Amino acid sequence: MRTLTVALPGREYDILIQRGLLSQAGDRIRAVLPRAQKLAVVTDSNVKPLYGDMVLSSLAAAGFDCRLFPVPPGEESKNPYQLTALWEGFLDFGLTRTDGVVALGGGVVGDLAGFAAATVLRGVAFVQIPTTLLAQVDSSVGGKVAVDLDAGKNLAGAFHQPRLVLMDPDALDTLSLPVFMDGMAEVLKYGCIRDGAFFDFLTARPDREALTADIEHILYTCCDIKRQVVAEDELDTGARMVLNFGHTLGHAYELAGGYVEWTHGQAVAAGMCMAAKLGVALGVTPANVPGRIEAACACLGLPTSIPCTPEEYAAAIGLDKKGAGADITVILLDGIGRAVPCKLPKAGLLQQLEALL
Ligand SMILES: NC(=O)c1ccc[n+]([C@@H]2O[C@H](COP(=O)([O-])OP(=O)(O)OC[C@H]3O[C@@H](n4cnc5c(N)ncnc54)[C@H](O)[C@@H]3O)[C@@H](O)[C@H]2O)c1
Ligand SMILES: [Zn+2]
């Protein structure tokens, strides 16, 4: 068992990483929620037949009264209507303020269930059991929970830290290759921003099989980086910004493809490659860095560039939550493993991007 503690004063919690952990969920959750009687388990209809019974029987064996709340798979479920349906369902189930909500699934389920837990009865305890690589290395740690609105993604949400995060690497075995590689884009990101040796470790494992053989180390390293960044900046007002490496430009690619052509991980991969080139053009990034990131992405079948017009870049920069006023902060690298936030005028950034098209 590998354990990491997210040290937030008054809201400290553990991340447990172990093969086979899903079948021990009951005892692990009982240890952090000794008084809870009921657990509402939110999942999606892909994950339910794979792991629903295993988790439910473990929770029942630990004395919990549980009910599964399956939602349809995919981003479309992260909306205010599903949120309302969960609130109503939890109350129908008889959930009280001493009970809890469990998210069993990918980032969609985690964000939706977490926001439902943050808001029902003014907030109940929440446990994350992430089952995608992206959810294990990224969305289950840090306490950001949200639903999407017509105006954009994640626009209604909260910070609601989980009481516990249970990661079972075996659950990743059933992921499709594209979903696995989508998560790998975020894994590479951690190497790029904080840990050059980890980046080298990843590039020495160029396929899913080799990565899976060392998956516990990979999960541990990513979560360790994320928890440090989160502990420095719980409410995302400064240091947490480095996690956006590849994301500002990735957002442009997601927009360019209407959010259907490119997955988030693909857009982030191309965004990291472009941010590296941008860094070279701005004199921040050493000249060999773009090639190294491109090679790492290409090896995993992730795109190294995505067609995008200046207008799409402009739209992404203008709407980006990370931008403030006429300036925007982009995350660049002054080497693999070292992220540096750079503030520059939006117009100047657009000019640089156009020159790189
Ligand atoms: N809260 C945060 O800090 C944060 C950070 C990053 C991303 N996110 C959010 O995460 C979401 C994306 O998460 P995701 O990539 O996990 O997508 P997802 O939850 O849609 O899961 C991807 C697909 O994998 C399936 N699946 C899940 N676990 C499986 C398993 N073990 N075996 C087989 N299939 C499985 C799901 O049913 C789904 O079809 C986005 O909504 C994004 O905004 C949140
Ligand atoms: Zn991301």
Image: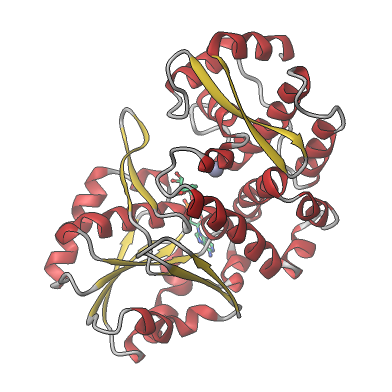
Name the quadrant containing residue 218.
Answer: bottom right
Residue 193 picture location, percent across and down: 68, 43
Which corner quadrant of the figure contains ligand 2?
top right
The residue under the point 37% across, 59% down is: 161
Image quarter where the N terminus lies is: bottom right
Residue 21 picture location, percent across and down: 53, 79
The residue under the point 86% across, 27% down is: 287
The residue under the point 76% across, 55% down is: 198
Task: Choose between 3 and 355: the one closer to the eye.
Answer: 3
Q: Is residue 57 left or right of residue 355?
A: left
The residue under the point 20% across, 74% down is: 98
Name the quadrant containing residue 58.
Answer: bottom left
Residue 51 picture location, percent across and down: 46, 73
Q: Say if residue 94 shows up in the picture.
A: yes
Q: Is residue 148 above or below residue 355?
A: below
Task: Choose between 84 and 14: the one closer to the eye.
Answer: 14
Q: Is residue 23 above or below residue 279?
A: below
Tally of numbered discs: 0
Q: Say if residue 263 shows up in the picture.
A: no
Q: Is residue 306 above or below residue 235?
A: above
Image quarter where the C terminus lies is: top right
Residue 189 picture location, percent across and down: 66, 45
Q: Is residue 13 left or right of residue 149?
A: right
Q: Is residue 212 above or below residue 62?
A: above
